[in-house]
Amino acid sequence: MIYQDTIIALATPSGAGAIAVIRLSGNEAISIAEKQFKSVSGKLLGQQKTHTIHLGHIVDGAITIDEVLVSVFKDPNSYTGENVVEISCHGSNYIQQEIIQLFLREGCRMANAGEFTLRAFLNGKLDLSQAEAVADLIASDNAASHQIAMQQMRGRFSSEIAKLREELLNFASLIELELDFAEEDVEFADRSQFKELVERITFVLKRLIDSFAVGNVIKNGIPVAIVGEPNVGKSTLLNALLNEERAIVSEIAGTTRDTIEDEISIGGIGFRFIDTAGIRETKDVVESIGIKRTFEKIEQAQVVVYISPLTPEGGIAHGTLIEIEKIKNKYPLKNLIVIFNKIDKLSEKEIENLKSSIVDFQSSIKNILFISAKTGRGVEAFKSTLLDFVNTGALRNNDTIVTNSRHYDALLKAFEEIDKVKHGLETGLSGDLLAIDIRQALYHFGEITGEITNDDLLGNIFANFCIGK
C-alpha cells in the first residue's frame, strides 16, 4: 500500500458547534491548501515552518467562505508522516461542507475510515498495536480503559514484544547459521543461554495472556446482573447507582418485564448493570419471556447481585435462602453478592436481629450487604464490594495489560510455538526442526506489531476507526 493522493475529512464530530477541524494529509496537502487560503500576513503556507498556525480566510474565487486558523505540519514530522494541514473553522454544517467540497474540487479525496492512522502506520510513525490503541483511546469511557490505551499508544506493549522478538531473532539467526555448517557438527547458539531465554519468554507471554482476563472486562465493562423476586427493589437500586430515574419503579410486582442496561464508572472501572425481570412463577406470557431473558443475562454476567426480600416483620422471606443456594449451585464460578434491601423500614435493633439470624448463611456466602436503595444507605459499600472483584493490581503497578482480542490470539499462538521450542530443547531436537518452531513464534510476534501483515488484516482493523482519524 503506497498512497500518493491527498485525503481530507472532518476530524471533529459532525454537527454544528463552536469550532470544527478539517484535516488534509498527503504530499500536496500544503500546496492545495495554499491556493484557497489567504493569510492576513500575506505569506504563502509553503514558505512557513512546520508546526505553525496562521490566521486567514478560506476563499473560493471571489467568495470568502470563513475566517480560519490553519495549522501546518511538514513531513516527516506529522501524525501521518506526510504533509498535514488542519483547518479550524466555525462549526456551521454549511461552512464545513463548503470547505470540504472546495478541496475535493481541487484534487483531494475523501478519507476512508481510519486512513490517517493507517498512513501513520505505513509511514512508520506508529506500529500496528499503537495504531489500534488510538481507536481504544477514542472509545475509552473510564479512567482504567484510558490508562491502558495511553500505555499501548506510547508503545509500552509493543516495546515488550519487540524486545522478545529481537532476542529470539538473534538466536534464530545462530541456529540458522548452524544449518549451513551441518557437516561440521558445530553449535553457534549456546543451548543453556537459549533455554534461559525461552524460560523468560514463556514467563512474559504467560503474564500477558493472563492479563487479558482483566483487560477485556476493563475495556468492555464488567456485566453485573441484578436479580431477585419481583418488587424487591432491583430497579430502585439501578436508579440509585445511576443517580437518575432510569428504570420504572412501582409497588406493582412485575413492573420490569424486560432487561434494562446502563453503564457507570466506579473507581475508574466501567460496570454494565443489567436490571432484570423479577423471578417468579407466572402465567403472563410477556413476563415469562422477561424471566427467560433474566437467566440469559445471568449467564453473560460476571457478577450476580441477588436482592432478597424481607418479611413485614423484618425477617427473611420464606424460601429466599433456598433460591440463593440454587443460583450459587447453578453458577458456582460467578461472583455473587446477596443484598437485603429496604432496611429503611427497620429499626437498628431489627437490623441487628436480621444480621444475627443469617450467621450460618454467611459462612457460605462471603458478600452479604444490608442496604436501602431508596435512601442510598449502604450503596457506597456495595460499590466498594464490586471493585474488590476487579484485580486492579496490574493497573496500580502500571503493568502492561492486554485488551485486544487479536493480540490475545497472537500471544496464545506464540506461546504454543515457544512451548514446542522448550520441549525441543529438553529432548535434544535437531536445529532444523527447532528453527521451524522459532520462525512460527517470530511470525506471531510480528503479527502484533505489524512487521508481518496483509491488506485484509489492515482493512479489518482500520474499518473500525472513525473517519477523520
Image: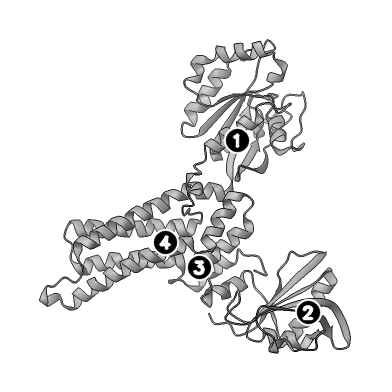
Quarter of the figure with the C terminus: bottom right
Distance of mark 1 from mark 2, alpha carbons?
A: 49 Å
Q: Earlier in the sequence, mark 3 or mark 1?
A: 3
Q: Nearer the viewer, mark 2 or mark 4?
A: 4
Scheme of colours in the image: one colour
Give the left or right position of residue 327, taking residue 238 as reference.
left
Asked whether the beta carbons under mark 3 and mark 1 sit within 8 Å of each other, the answer is no
**Residue density around tag 1, few if under 14, some if 14–19, many if 20 or more, within 10 Å:** many
| Viewer-proximal residue among 167 and 292 | 167
- Find residue 429 and report its horizontal and vertical position in percent: 18, 62
- Find residue 154 and report its horizontal and vertical position in percent: 53, 63
Q: Earlier in the sequence, mark 2 or mark 4?
A: 2
Which residue lies under the disc numbered 4? 160
Distance of mark 4 from mark 3, alpha carbons?
A: 14 Å
Q: Earlier in the sequence, mark 4 or mark 3?
A: 3
* Residue type pointed to by label 2: Gln
**Residue density around tag 4, few if under 14, some if 14–19, many if 20 or more, within 10 Å:** some
* Residue type pointed to by label 3: Leu
Distance of mark 3 from mark 2, alpha carbons?
A: 32 Å
* Residue type pointed to by label 4: Glu
Residue 325 seen by the camera: yes
> What element does badge 1 sit on?
strand
Asked whether the beta carbons under mark 2 and mark 4 sit within 8 Å of each other, the answer is no
Which residue lies under the disc numbered 1? 225
